[in-house]
Amino acid sequence: MAKSNARKLASWTLLTAVGLAGGLIAGLLVGMPLGQIFNAMIVTAAVTCVVGGVLGSMQAVYLRQLLTKPIWWVLATILGLGVGLAAGVVLIEQIGILVTGSRPNVTHLTAPMRALSFLALGLVSGTSLGIAQWLVLRRQTSRVKYWVPTIAIALAVAFCVSSLLTDLSGLRFATAPGLVMFVLASGLAFGALSSWPLLRAH
C-alpha cells in the first residue's frame, strides 16, 4: 500500500510539475511576441489559457483512471486558472497602486513583498482553479474530497515558497536561471501538496 501510494504521489507530482512549469514557460514564450501586437488584455488571456491547457493536459494523463471524460478537466483547468491568474494579477496591481501610487513590478519588489504577492496570487488563482476542477470531479467521481481548499493552499504555498527559495539562492528573479528555478520549484511543490485528496480516492 505504501509503495503504491508512493508511486501515485510521484506520478501526480511529476505530471503536475511538468504541466505547471511547462505551462508557465510556454505562456511567457507566447506572451512576448503577442505583446508587440495586441493589448494587455488579449495577451493575458492567451498566456493564462496556455498555462491552463498545458497543466490540465498533463494532469489529465493521471486522471484517466478516475474520470470518464478527462477532456472536461483540461477545459476546466484552462478556465479556472485563466480567470484566477487574471483576477490575482489585477488584485495585486490595484492594491499596489493604492499603497504606493504606482503599479508594482514583481522584479523590483523586495524578497518578502514578492513572496507575499505570490502568496496572494496563488491563493486567488488556486481557489478559482480548484472550484473549476471540483465541478468536473463532482460530476465524474465522488471519491475526491476537499479539493478546493487543497488546491488554493497548495498553489499559494508553492508560489510563495518558490519565490523565497529563488531569492535565497542568490538568483535574480528577472533572469532566465531565476525564472527556471521558480517555475520548477513551484511545479514540484504544487504537485506534492495537491496530491493527498487523490491518494485517498483510490
Image (cartoon, grey):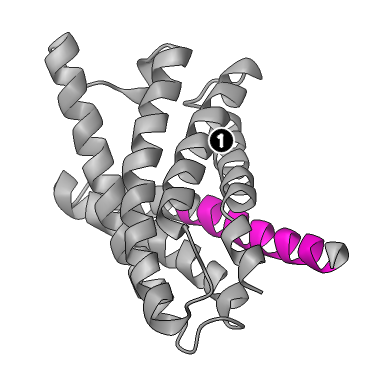
- Dot 1 lies on which element? helix
Q: Quadrant of residue 131?
A: bottom left
Q: Could you say where residue 89 lies in the image, as x and y percent from the top left?
A: 26, 37
Q: Main secondary structure of the magenta part?
A: helix
Q: Is residue 5 magenta?
A: yes
Q: Quadrant of residue 134?
A: bottom left
Return the residue at label 1: 182
Quarter of the picture containing the C terminus is bottom right
Q: Residue at 62% x, 74% y: name it.
A: 62
Magenta segment range? 4-23
Above/below status of 55 relative to 98: below
Q: Is residue 76 magenta?
A: no
Quarter of the picture containing the N terminus is bottom right
Q: Could you say where residue 126 lies in the image, as x and y percent from the top left?
A: 39, 48
Q: Could you say where residue 173 lies in the image, as x and y percent from the top left?
A: 50, 25
Residue 81 visible somewhere in the drawing: no
Which sits in the foreground, 200 or 6? 200
Q: How many marks?
A: 1
Q: Could you say where residue 5 lies in the image, as x and y percent from the top left?
A: 77, 64
- Report the amino acid beneath label 1: Phe
Residue 72 visible somewhere in the drawing: yes
Above/below status of 88 relative to 128: above
For residue 101, side relative to residue 5 (left or right): left
